[in-house]
Each structure stands twice: as structure tokens, then as C-alpha cells.
Image (spheres, rainbow, N blue to C red):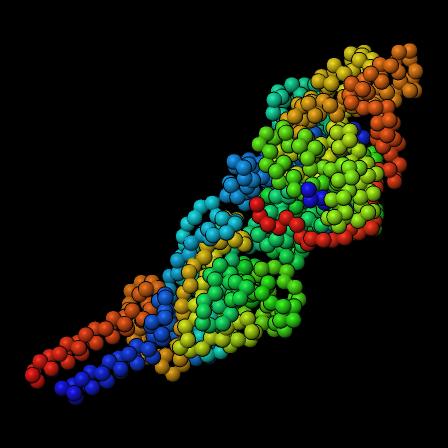
């Protein structure tokens, strides 16, 4: 066992309101620079839809991530011999408006208009595409460009009754087995020993963009002005002083959680090589993520030079509870095999609403309906568990049971309390779990959502993971 | 008899001496050598200058790099036409290759890779460094030109073999940041001019013959210097390790005084299409030498036969 610690984010999709505040505050903090106009380290996608860059999940098109060849992991760019990064059109052509004209135009009967102006060339342009172009277009033909339809008949979901939508905010996943890092022949990308943040060394980078092509999430971006690649830095200058990332700090829905996870670095590669994609997430949670209360883990962590403050933070980590103890959050597209260290609680609310309104079902009767949700379980499983529906159903049942339980405490209808307790135990939760979950998900005080150790971890080894597999 | 033998020996000595003086060290040369003509005064930087049209070139074969990641999906070969001139203080290489598209970095060109070319020199003459960008104990000096960006004078392979003090003294950052590093500003003494027309790049790269930095070799007339070439075709997404490279090609700067007659001899002896093998005088002279030696030997034998 080789214990390492990482500061990890969880996003509770149930609470995302799609306001894009996270994207804007990230942009304002880090990305208002020439060459980066088209770049959104944080972006929010309305799903189903093509995402940003357009159809990024389609690895036949973009060649990101790893492929398993026998017992060997190989970069898909290498296997396919196709190292091309996306073009600007695959993201979008960034623009502003000619606001000056609104003030300087001569007075006529018609109001002056502010034409769109390219942020790249400064020339007038037509706006034809943008990040999240399909916002509020659930059911439109653009849903065809979504990659998560396997096993579903997407035509059904264009019909009024079956239309569904959800928001998917995305940042770099600061993966445990990052294909961006391994793709760089200059070894310009490294994963920080002290907190697991993956960074591009701007001095070493020569702008080759192999990382851009190799990241299956398309979360490394080429700065065409500096000629180098850049990516989300997990706001490390803030993390280092105990502050949450800007996107977490400003999140309107309070959907984001930050905490420490201890993991076994020795298990990472083996799980990344798991032949059956559906087993990746269960093995990730069981074998890679460690229990910070286990004395053996603590001992190994100390031996590995992890500071007490970090071990302590791991014990009170909201992320640990959500991800490992309750198993209600999963990584995005684990089948890309980069072992992403960002976890999503799948969205639930549209089901409840639909169930109560259309079918008149009581909250306590909801379990049989998990599979008949507005957002198909299969769709969520394709997105978060490499098709493992059991995991998604398990998580949704817990979320439903939690609601039923909290409701029973407030509504106090005869019989409801017992029924709710039964739901809880069926879902695998205790009443204490439910209380804790409720506090974390609903009340969400600042210091409960963000548990960030400030004491720097002792650095024992420098630059992990620079040897190619 | 004795007179004849000493005559023969003298003849052979002259022949060997001649061969050595003309085409350098014949025995150690692993590849044919290319003579670099001497010119008085300035060498034209303009790739389209008529001066270059008169210079005999060599066709250098390049093949896709297939040794280390990233490996090109389609291994194929290309040709680079290399011409060279020197004027005592500077040596200029005129590089010409066909490329159907002119690729230059553009604003917003996220998937655009500029066409590029590079010449690799050993940092010191003598033992050849590893051809794939040198080794810790034997680095290489690279002049790298990129369309739209100009030329850089680089060193590769040196990084990890030097102490921070040694690196300080060389004007490099105390700890290496990459396997290929920019030499300090005082060594940025290379110049480039490029022209693209009708599917052909023509690039002139110039460097001083003198070693202006310890990681640049001193080039002197008569001393062969091995160089290797690389070309990147941007439209195929080539950058970094995705490139086409050559083997070592040996060049010899001609001495100022003798240059004129020698070059004439070479061009007269070996006309026809420019091929490495054909323009180099080594084989021609070696063949002539062997021929004369054989004649002399036969002559000696004949003489001996007569006398007995
Ligand atoms: S998501 Fe993973 S592979 Fe992509 S840039 Fe981040 S660390 Fe690298
Ligand atoms: S700020 Fe929060 S709620 Fe708003 S879009 Fe971003 S993640 Fe969702």
C-alpha cells in the first residue's frame, strides 16, 4: 500500500441550477487573457447535448483516454496514430459585441445595433455556435450529438412527454492516471505530490498539444497566443491557504464539496486496467480509495510522509462520506480509464416531481419507480459508471430514501415514519447517515462543504507518474 | 631495381598525400562528405538569390521518426535538397523541400502546426553524438526554424548531465526545464530567411563558423562536420517527435585559397543529378588513387621484369 492524499471535489447534480456562475467567476479569475478567449476551464453543459467542445465524449472523433490492449494500457492517440487536437470550431469562435457603436452611432429612427465581433480577428462575424448552444433545447435534434444513448432509443426522448434535461458542470478531473500527463513527450505535466493537483509546467511546455488530444475530457486547452497548453489549476493558490476553488466558492446552488481522499497509489494502475468497464467504479471505490479511520491506512499514510493535518482532514472529509461511505457519487466516464478524481451525485429531482404529479404516488412508494425516472438510469449509468446501472440505482435509492425520511420527520403522517425508516434500511443507510447526509446536502454550511487542510504535506517523492507505462 | 622501387614508393606517397589533402580523412569517413564552397564576402540570405541557383546541392533522404513515442502512423520518406556555402566567418545552409501546404501559426489556430526544419550539429567534433537529439555526455546543437517564428539556437541532451554550476557557467537555467533548451542570448547568433512558393519551402539558415558558445562546435576548413536534418510538415499534424529525420551527413568547409580549383575539379569530375554519393569527391578520388596505384604497381612489375 502506497498512500497518497488528494484534495477532491464532489458535485451534487441534484442542486445545480445551470446558472453558469462557476464558469464566469473562473473565467474572470484566470482566463481573461489573449489566446484564451475560447477557453472555459469550468463549463456547464445542458444534457442531453453535444457538450463543449462539441461531442467531446466521442473518442472515435477525438482519440482521448486509454485503451486496453490485453493487459496493457495504451494512449488512444498512439494506438490510432491520430494526434490531432480539436480545431477552434470544435469549441466555438469567441466573440464580443461592438458596444461602442451603441454610443457613437448617429441618431436615426432605428436603434443602433451592436454587431458581434470576433475576439480572435477583431472582424465582424456571425454567431453560429457557442459553448452550451443547446441550453433550454432539451429534446431538440442536438440531443443526437450526445454520446450517452447506448441502450436507449433517443428518438423517444425528443417527444414532449419524455423530454428530460440535466446540467453537467465540468472541470479537469485531476485524474489518478491522467492520459494528458503520459501523452506529453516533454514531461511538462505533473501531478503534485502534496495535493494531487495536475498542472502543466509552462516552462517545459512547447505547445505540442499531445495532452490536448489525449485528455478524454478535453480539459487541456491550447493558448494560441503563448503557444503553450494550459489547464484548470484547481485554484491551487487558494487551496494552499485553505480556501475553496473559485467555482466552489461562488456556486449558487452550493452543489460543490471539497475534501481530502486518501488513496492507494499501488492499486491505481491495476484498476485502470480492469477488463470489464462496469467493474471499474466499484473497484475504484473499494480498492483505490482508502478508509482514513482504518489504523493500517493511517500508519501507512504517516509512513508516506502525509502530515497529520491531512490525515485529520481526510477523516472529516465530506467527499469521503459522499463517495465511499454512502457511495452516492461517481466519476465521469470511468471507461476512459484515467481514474478521474471528481465525483458526481446523480440528479434526482425530476423523478420525484414526475412521480408525485403524474402518477399520484406517495413518496414512500417510490422505490419501484427508480427505473422509470424521467432521466433514464441507463443514461446516467452510461455517463457515470460505464453502464453499471446497479450503482446508479443504489445511489438514487439512497437519495429517495433520504427525502422520504426527512419528509416523514416534518410531515408526520401516520405510518410514514416507519415506511421511511424501512426505505432507509433497504437503501443501506442508518438514521445517523440520513441526518449527516441531510446536513451536508441540504444545510451545507461553508466549513462543512469545504474541509481543506492548510498545513502542507511533507513532500517525500518528487514528480510522480512520469514514467510511461 | 632499387631505383624503381623507391620511385614507386614516392609515387604512392604522393598519391596518398593528394588524397588526404583533397578529401580529408578517407579512412574514418562513414558517410560521403559534401564540400562546402568558399565565397568571398557576404552570403545571400535570400533563398531565391541567383547565387544559390549555382550551388550544387545534395539530396538528403529523410524518414519518419519511428524510434520513440510519438510515432507517426504512416512511415514514409521525403527528400531535402541541401546546399551550403561559407565565407570564412559564417556558414549558410540552403534547405529546400516540397510541401503542398504552407502552415504558419495563426491566431486561433488551435489545430495548426507550423512547418519547420532543423539542422543538428555535434557540440564538439570527434565522436559523433547519438543521432536522436544527443546524450547527456555528448549533446547536440540544433538550429531550429519554424514558419512564422524564425530560428532558434538550441542544445539538446545536455540537460541532465551538468551540475548547476556548470549550467550557470554555460548561461543555462540552473536546473534544466526541458530536454531541448534555448542557448543563452549571446549564443542566439543564427539567422534565417524563408520563402514559400509553388509547394516548395526554401529556407536559408546561417551560423557563425566560430564556436560562440561552448555548446557550439568550431567549424574549420578541411575538418569534416557531421550534421543531421529534420523536417516537420504541419498539415500532417507534425510537431515535436512527429517528424522526418536524416542520418548524419558529413560536410567539409573548403579552404579559401584552394577552393576555386578544387570545386571546379569536383564539378567537372562528377556531373549529373545531385546525389550524396555523386557529388562527394571521396569515392572519385579514392578510385583514381587506387587506379594510379595499380598502374604504378604494374609499371613497377614490368620494369622489374625487364631488368631481370
Ligand atoms: S481531466 Fe484528467 S486527463 Fe484531462 S486534463 Fe485533467 S488530469 Fe489530465
Ligand atoms: S455555479 Fe453551481 S449551480 Fe450554478 S451552474 Fe455552476 S455548478 Fe451549477
Q: Quadrant where the C terminus of chain A lies?
A: top right
Q: Residue at x 82, y 47 (%)?
A: A308
Relative to the observer, which residue lies in front, B155 or A405?
Answer: A405
Q: Position of residue A174 (x, y in %)?
A: 70, 43
Q: Is residue B181 visible?
A: no
Determine the residue located farthest toward the bottom in the rendered image.
B3
- Quick check: A422 above or below B153? above
Q: Residue at x 26, y 82 (%)?
A: B13
Q: Residue at x 87, y 34 (%)?
A: A444
A188 relative position to A325: left or right: left
Relative to the observer, which residue lies in front, A362 or A465?
Answer: A465
A427 relative position to B35: left or right: right
Relative to the observer, which residue lies in front, A402 or A77?
Answer: A402
Q: Position of residue A406 (x, y in %)?
A: 88, 22
- Quick check: B54 above or below A31? below
- Quick check: B150 above or below A461? below
Q: How many marks?
A: 0
Q: Position of residue A294 (x, y in %)?
A: 77, 37
Q: Is residue B113 visible?
A: yes
Q: Position of residue A324 (x, y in %)?
A: 75, 32
Q: Quadrant where the N terminus of chain A lies?
A: top right
State which quadrant residue A359 falls in.
Answer: top right
State which quadrant residue A389 falls in.
Answer: top right
Q: Residue at x 45, y 69 (%)?
A: B127
Relative to the observer, which residue lies in front, A51 or B303?
Answer: B303
A217 relative position to A83: left or right: right
Amino acid at each position: 500500500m502506497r498512500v497518497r492524499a488528494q484534495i477532491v471535489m464532489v458535485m451534487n447534480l441534484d442542486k445545480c441550477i445551470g446558472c453558469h456562475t462557476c464558469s464566469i467567476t473562473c473565467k474572470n479569475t484566470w482566463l481573461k487573457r489573449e489566446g484564451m478567449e475560447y477557453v472555459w476551464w469550468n463549463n456547464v453543459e445542458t444534457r442531453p447535448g453535444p457538450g463543449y467542445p462539441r461531442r467531446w465524449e466521442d473518442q472515435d472523433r477525438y482519440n482521448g483516454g486509454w485503451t486496453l490492449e490485453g493487459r496493457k494500457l495504451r494512449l488512444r492517440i498512439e494506438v490510432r496514430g491520430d494526434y490531432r487536437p480539436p480545431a477552434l470550431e470544435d469549441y466555438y469562435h469567441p466573440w464580443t459585441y461592438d458596444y461602442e457603436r451603441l454610443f457613437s452611432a448617429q441618431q436615426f429612427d432605428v436603434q443602433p445595433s451592436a454587431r458581434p465581433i470576433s475576439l480572435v480577428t477583431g472582424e465582424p462575424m456571425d454567431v453560429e455556435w457557442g459553448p452550451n448552444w443547446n441550453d433550454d433545447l432539451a429534446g431538440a435534434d442536438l440531443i443526437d450529438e450526445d454520446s450517452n444513448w447506448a441502450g436507449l432509443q433517443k428518438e423517444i426522448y425528443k417527444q414532449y412527454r419524455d423530454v428530460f434535461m440535466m446540467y453537467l458542470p465540468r472541470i479537469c478531473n485531476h485524474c489518478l492516471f491522467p492520459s494528458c500527463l503520459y501523452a506529453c513527450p516533454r514531461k511538462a505535466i505533473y501531478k503534485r505530490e502534496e495535493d494531487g493537483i495536475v498542472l502543466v509546467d509552462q516552462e517545459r511546455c512547447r505547445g505540442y498539444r499531445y495532452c490536448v488530444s489525449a485528455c478524454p475530457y478535453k480539459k487541456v486547452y491550447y493558448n494560441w497566443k503563448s503557444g503553450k497548453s494550459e489547464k484548470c489549476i484547481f485554484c491551487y493558490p487558494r487551496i494552499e491557504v485553505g480556501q475553496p476553488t473559485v467555482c466552489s466558492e461562488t456556486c449558487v446552488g452550493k452543489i460543490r464539496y471539497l475534501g481530502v481522499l486518501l488513496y492507494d497509489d499501488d492499486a491505481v494502475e491495476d484498476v485502470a486496467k480492469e477488463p470489464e468497464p462496469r467493474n471499474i467504479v466499484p473497484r475504484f471505490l473499494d480498492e483505490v480509495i482508502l478508509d482514513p479511520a482504518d489504523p493500517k491506512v493511517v500508519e501507512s499514510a504517516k509512513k508516506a510522509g502525509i502530515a497529520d493535518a491531512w490525515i485529520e482532514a481526510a477523516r472529516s472529509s465530506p467527499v469521503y462520506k459522499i463517495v465511499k461511505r454512502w457511495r452516492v457519487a461517481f466519476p465521469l466516464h470511468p471507461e476512459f480509464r484515467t481514474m478521474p478524481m471528481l465525483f458526481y451525485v446523480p440528479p434526482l429531482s425530476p423523478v420525484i416531481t414526475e412521480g408525485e404529479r403524474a402518477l399520484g404516488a406517495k413518496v414512500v412508494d417510490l422505490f419501484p419507480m427508480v427505473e422509470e425516472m424521467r432521466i433514464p438510469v441507463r443514461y446516467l449509468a452510461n455517463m457515470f459508471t460505464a453502464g453499471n446501472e446497479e450503482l446508479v440505482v443504489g445511489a438514487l435509492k439512497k437519495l429517495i430514501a433520504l427525502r422520504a425520511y426527512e419528509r416523514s420527520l416534518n410531515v408526520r403522517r401516520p405510518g410514514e415514519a416507519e415506511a421511511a425508516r424501512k426505505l432507509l434500511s433497504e437503501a443501506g443507510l442508518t438514521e445517523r447517515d440520513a441526518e449527516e447526509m441531510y446536513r451536508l446536502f441540504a444545510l451545507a454550511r461553508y466549513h462543512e462543504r469545504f474541509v481543506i487542510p492548510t498545513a502542507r504535506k511533507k513532500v517525500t517523492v518528487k514528480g510522480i507518474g512520469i514514467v510511461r507505462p | 631495381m632499387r631505383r624503381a622501387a623507391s620511385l614507386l614508393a614516392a609515387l604512392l606517397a604522393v598519391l596518398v598525400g593528394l588524397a588526404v589533402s583533397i578529401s580529408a580523412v578517407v579512412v574514418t569517413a562513414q558517410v560521403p562528405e559534401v564540400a562546402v564552397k568558399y565565397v568571398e564576402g557576404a552570403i545571400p540570405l535570400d533563398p531565391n538569390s541567383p547565387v544559390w541557383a549555382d550551388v550544387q546541392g545534395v539530396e538528403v533522404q529523410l524518414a519518419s521518426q519511428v524510434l520513440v513515442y510519438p510515432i507517426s502512423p504512416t512511415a514514409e520518406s521525403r527528400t531535402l535538397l541541401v546546399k551550403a556555402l561559407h565565407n570564412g566567418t559564417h556558414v549558410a545552409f540552403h534547405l529546400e523541400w516540397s510541401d503542398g501546404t504552407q502552415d504558419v501559426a495563426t491566431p486561433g489556430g488551435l489545430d495548426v502546426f507550423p512547418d519547420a526544419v532543423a539542422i543538428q550539429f555535434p557540440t564538439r567534433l570527434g565522436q559523433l553524438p547519438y543521432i536522436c537529439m544527443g546524450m547527456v555526455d555528448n549533446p547536440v546543437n540544433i538550429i531550429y526554424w519554424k514558419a512564422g517564428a524564425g530560428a532558434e539556437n538550441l542544445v539538446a541532451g545536455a540537460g541532465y548531465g551538468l551540475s548547476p554550476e556548470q549550467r550557470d557557467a554555460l548561461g543555462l537555467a540552473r536546473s534544466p526545464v526541458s530536454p531541448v533548451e534555448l542557448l543563452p542570448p549571446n549564443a542566439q547568433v543564427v539567422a534565417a530567411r524563408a520563402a514559400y512558393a509553388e509547394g516548395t519551402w526554401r529556407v536559408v539558415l546561417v551560423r557563425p563558423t566560430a564556436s560562440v558558445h561552448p555548446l557550439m562546435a568550431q567549424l574549420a576548413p578541411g575538418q569534416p562536420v557531421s550534421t543531421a536534418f529534420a523536417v516537420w510538415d504541419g498539415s500532417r499534424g507534425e510537431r515535436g517527435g512527429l517528424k522526418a529525420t536524416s542520418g548524419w551527413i558529413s560536410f567539409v568547409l573548403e579552404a579559401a585559397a584552394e577552393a576555386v580549383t578544387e570545386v571546379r575539379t569536383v564539378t567537372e569530375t562528377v556531373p549529373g543529378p545531385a546525389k550524396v554519393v555523386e557529388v562527394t569527391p571521396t569515392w572519385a578520388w579514392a578510385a583514381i588513387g587506387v587506379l594510379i596505384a595499380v598502374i604504378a604497381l604494374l609499371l613497377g612489375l614490368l620494369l622489374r621484369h625487364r631488368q631481370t
